[in-house]
Amino acid sequence: MFNVILFGPPGSGKGTQSEKLIAHYGVKHLSTGDLLRSEIAQGTPLGLEAKSVMDKGQLVPDEVVIGMISSALERNPTVPGFLFDGFPRTVAQAEALDKLLALKHTEIGVVLALDVSEEELVGRLLNRGKTSGRSDDTNEEIIRARIIEYKNKTTTVAQYYAQFNKVVHIAGEGSVDEIFESLRIEIDGRK
Ligand code: ADP
């Protein structure tokens, strides 16, 4: 089993590259953003609580997302690996994930960090907001809040994995295929 974390700020292309990685490697995609949006769409109590936090550009409490990931791991016992997208976003989430994977006698193989400039991120997200129906993509203030939340809380996750030499930085500007090729080379070199 080879597990990958796709890491990077909002708008860095995690969703786009995830689709290509899933098609190529057959890994199971676990996106906490998608899982949360599905809870919202179903109108569950968890979804209602999450929506108000997400619409401020802030992070949903660690226990909530860790619980969602734990059940998703349980639901997929036989996959060749997991692709984590948008998770972990805090060091507490990273530590919890390591424990959950250790229980399954597996671990994170590599953390692929997509580097994209802030102005490019804001442009991409505002553009996505025109068609995605995501309320957190239509307002520049919310977008900037998400980028600040990323800088304050989430960059520490890369430092956490760097101590285990698991982080590789990938230039996230360029064509979708060029970026995918860089990701693929790193995964194939470590598998
Ligand atoms: P983005 O496109 O900004 O990377 P996502 O689709 O991954 O966003 O997530 C959208 C929102 O869902 C985040 O801004 C945050 O409020 C919430 N969220 C998603 N994943 C997590 C997580 N691991 N921890 C806390 N909150 C999360």
Image (cartoon, helix red, strand yellow):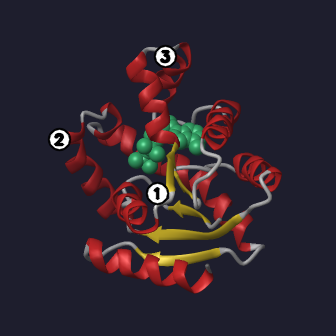
Q: Quadrant of residue 46?
A: top right
In this image, 92 relative to 173: left or right? right
Of circles 3 and 1, which is in front? 3
- Amino acid carrying label 3: it is Leu
As drawn, 104 above or below 4: above
Mark carried by residue 9: 1
For the residue labelled by badge 1, is the local secondary structure a helix, a strand or a loop?
loop
Q: Residue at x 53, y 61 (%)?
A: 7
Q: Residue at x 81, y 55 (%)?
A: 102
Instruction: Work out which quarter of the rendered image holds the N terminus and state it.
Output: bottom right
Q: Earlier in the sequence, mark 1 or mark 2?
A: 1
As drawn, 123 above or below 143: below
Q: Residues within 10 Å of mark 2 (few under 14, many from 20)?
A: few
| Alpha carbons under labels 3 and 1: distance apart | 24 Å
Foreground residue among 189 and 140 = 189
> Does the beta carbon at disc 1 come under 8 Å from ligand 1?
yes
- Amino acid carrying label 2: it is Lys
| Alpha carbons under labels 1 and 2: distance apart | 19 Å
Mark carried by residue 130: 2
Q: Residue at x 62, y 67 (%)?
A: 2
For the residue labelled by badge 2, is the local secondary structure a helix, a strand or a loop?
helix
- Amino acid carrying label 1: it is Pro
